[in-house]
Each structure stands twice: as structure tokens, then as C-alpha cells.
Image (cartoon, helix red, strand yellow):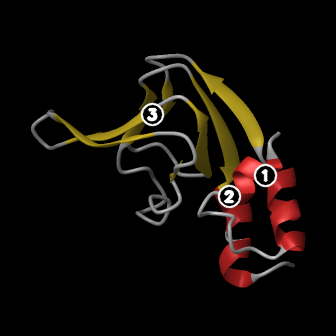
Amino acid sequence: MDKSFLRATPLFRDLPERLFERLVSAIRIHRVKRGESVFQQGQAAGEIFIVMEGWVKYARIDSEGREIVLGVLGKGQAFGESLAPINGVYPGSAEAVANARIARLPALISRFQATGPA
């Protein structure tokens, strides 16, 4: 795992070294093929994701069944962290629009950012 890459992302940039190391130890790398889902709208929100390589589309389906694309995320961008508090489910879906490598961090562990190390 490329710790220097992760350290440079906004999610980890300002963390104390000890906390950074704890969080990085919980990360798992996942490869996602183009067209493959990362998570679905309405799915229990339990992880935060960082794009290591590739592109991921974040979208939601509105009440009339139309897809609303909210963004396309690239290398170094995190997603899922601001979504988890909404009733505990992801309010949109994430899908790879190119083959991607994604770092997955359990959302509960990431809350160390707010509370500090245990």
C-alpha cells in the first residue's frame, strides 16, 4: 500500500502519525472493474473509500427513476465519508467508470479523526 499517497489525501493529511498508522492498518484495497458497483443507493453505509487509480461515478436515482450524476471522482478523492450519517445508508450509488483501485476504510474506524486515538 502506498502510504505516502494516502498521507497526501485530504482525509489523512493533518492526522497525527500514530492515528494515521492505525487507520491505514484498517484499509483494504479493492479492485473494481469498469461498470462494477462499489455500493448501491440505500445500502447500509459502513465504509469510506479513496480512489487510488481510475474513475468512480457517484449518482442517485430520483423519485421519478432518473439517474442524477453528482460527480466523477478520480485519484486521491474520497467518497462515502459525508454520506454515512444520512439514516445510516448511502443516499446514492458509486460505480467504476474505468477499472479502478479503491482503498476501503471502515467508517467506524475513520471516526477516530473526530475523537482522537483510543
Locate the C terminus and report the quarter of the image it occupies: bottom right
- Quarter of the image holding residue 56? top left
Q: Which mark is residue 4?
A: 1
Badge 1 vs badge 2, beta-carbon distance below 8 Å: yes
The amino acid at mark 2 is Ala
Q: Residues within 10 Å of mark 2 (few under 14, many from 20)?
A: few
What residue sits 66% from the left and 80% below the top?
114
Which mark's residue is nearer the viewer, 3 or 1? Answer: 1
Mark 3 secondary-structure assignment: strand
Give x and y (percent) for residue 27: 77, 47
Query: Where 110 falls versus 79 (above or below)?
Result: below
Q: Which of pointers 3 and 1 lies earlier in the amino acid sequence?
A: 1
Task: Say which residue label 2 marks.
Answer: 8
- Quarter of the image holding residue 31? top right
Nearer to us in this view, 113 or 53: 53
Nearer to us in this view, 51 or 65: 51
Give x and y (percent) for residue 35: 43, 17
Q: Which of pointers 2 and 3 lies earlier in the amino acid sequence?
A: 2
Q: Residues within 10 Å of mark 1 (few under 14, many from 20)?
A: few
Task: Say which residue label 3 marks.
Answer: 56
Mark 2 secondary-structure assignment: loop
Mark 1 secondary-structure assignment: helix
